[in-house]
Amino acid sequence: MHGKTSNLHAMAAQRTETDLIPFASCSFTDAIQSECLKVPASEFAGSLRDTIDAVQQVATILSQFANAFGDFRLSNAISDCLDLLDFSADELNWSLSASQNQKGKSNSTGKLSSDLRTWLSAALVNQDTCSDGFEGTNSIVKGLVSTGLNQVTSLVQDLLTQVHPNSDHQGPNGQIPTWVKTEDRKLLQADGVNVDAVVAQDGTGNFTNVMDAVLAAPDYSMSRYVIYIKKGTYKENVEIKKKKWNLMMIGDGMDATIISGNRSYIDGWTTFRSATFAVSGRGFIARDITFENTAGPQKHQAVALRSDSDLSFYRDCKISGTVDFIFGDATVVFQNCQILAKKGLLNQKNSVTAQGRKDPNEPTGISIQFCNITADADLLPFVNSTFTYLGRPWKLYSRTVIMQSFLSNAIRPEGWLEWNADFALSTLSYGEYMNYGPGAGLGSRVKWPGYQVFNESTQVKNYTVAQFIEGNLWLPPTGVKYTAGFGA
């Protein structure tokens, strides 16, 4: 996926794992076996333990090579892999704890079936990301761990088949849960925000760079920690590790506070590690900040923002790039965003999305609603020669829905692009609903078995904020605006 250079100007939220709700779609009783699982709970727990052991075995093998080579790209790949296996171990342990905890307090939303499928899907994709990182490196290390990685993938796929899909996304009487707090909403809505740390390049704050402020933030914080970043372009790569909980970053505006990096695949970084801004910590929120990667399409893969959260929501963002610039295998909704295709390399085709769902039991996918998909200024003169498409299937069960959005004439009449010949054309799930604009015409759209034009709201309700990412259960306390369904 070459030319994956992207910029993201963001108000973003990811689900806080510690948010709890007092109701569940399947209860922590004997009924768990029939309502949530297709196998006895003891068998499910045993399979989880076997999978956790397999993850730890691969990590043990890899850790022996952490400092064994003087190869920059290989060292990055090994470091990435160890982090990703650590994420998988966490997600599997959450699944084990949640499926056994009678009080439902194991980082669960309380909707156990949904949580299990979300966590297991995250654990599934980590091995692929790990393996992809070894591209262009000495094949010896990849060969040593590939068998173990494939075993973990197979075990997680088996676990996914043991969980019942959950179509019940509503709380009691459709009400917002009573546990919802107002503190975060006030933080986002108030003109004056109480901050814990200030970053300013001119020395008028506590720190002069963003990463120092992140490192100084408390670990595992159960309360919101606010970092205010004054206007300026901060040329650094920022990583919010998984122990940094509930961080919130506020800038002076999209065009004023910019975090800028230029890491790329060509310069020796893995795609995973090329991100200018990477988030693994729970409960992260950003407002009025631009995240950009300036490497350019000639440097191939280059990422602006990487989020390792299970569920993500982006509102009022500006996102730009060339090939596959919105990619991955999360469960994510983009709402009210400007999505801008840029001019890439000569004869290069743009694809807005490249969703990576590899198993039909994963709940993952990309939903784009109320957005504006058009050409950026540099592409406008070339829309008839540089072709732009809504998406292409990165993995076999790729899933993307575009609805109630404006599509400019930059979008080709076919709408969607093949990945490689007929790969995934019958297994993908792509759809459009009530889009408008010169690029929204359906007469010349692809005729793939997996592509569908939706005519009724009932056909796409599962891709709304309320249903797809269960936004009513976790977005209210963040204060981020959202439309739960289809709007007025």
Image (cartoon, rainbow, N blue to C red):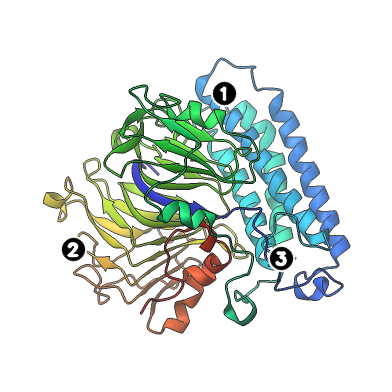
Which badge, 2 or 1, comes first in the chain's sequence?
1
Pick whichever, 348 or 108, lies toward us.
108
Circle 1 residue: 75
Q: Residue at x 42, y 38 (%)?
A: 228
Percent position of residue 123, x then y: 65, 50
- In the rendered image, the quadrant that contains the N terminus is top left
Q: Is residue 395 visible?
A: no
Task: Give neighbour class at mark 1: few <14, some 14-19, many 20+ (Cα, 10 Å).
Answer: many
Circle 3 residue: 112
Reply above or below: 70 against 99.
Answer: above
Q: Secondary structure at mark 2?
A: loop
User: Tag 1: residue type?
Assistant: Ser
Percent position of residue 9, x then y: 34, 46
Which badge, 3 or 1, comes first in the chain's sequence?
1
> How far is mark 3 from mark 1, CA to CA?
38 Å
Q: Secondary structure at mark 3?
A: helix
**Res. 45 image quadrant:** bottom right
Which badge, 2 or 3, comes first in the chain's sequence?
3
User: Tag 2: residue type?
Assistant: Asn
User: Tag 3: residue type?
Assistant: Leu
Q: Residue at x 87, y 73 (%)?
A: 30
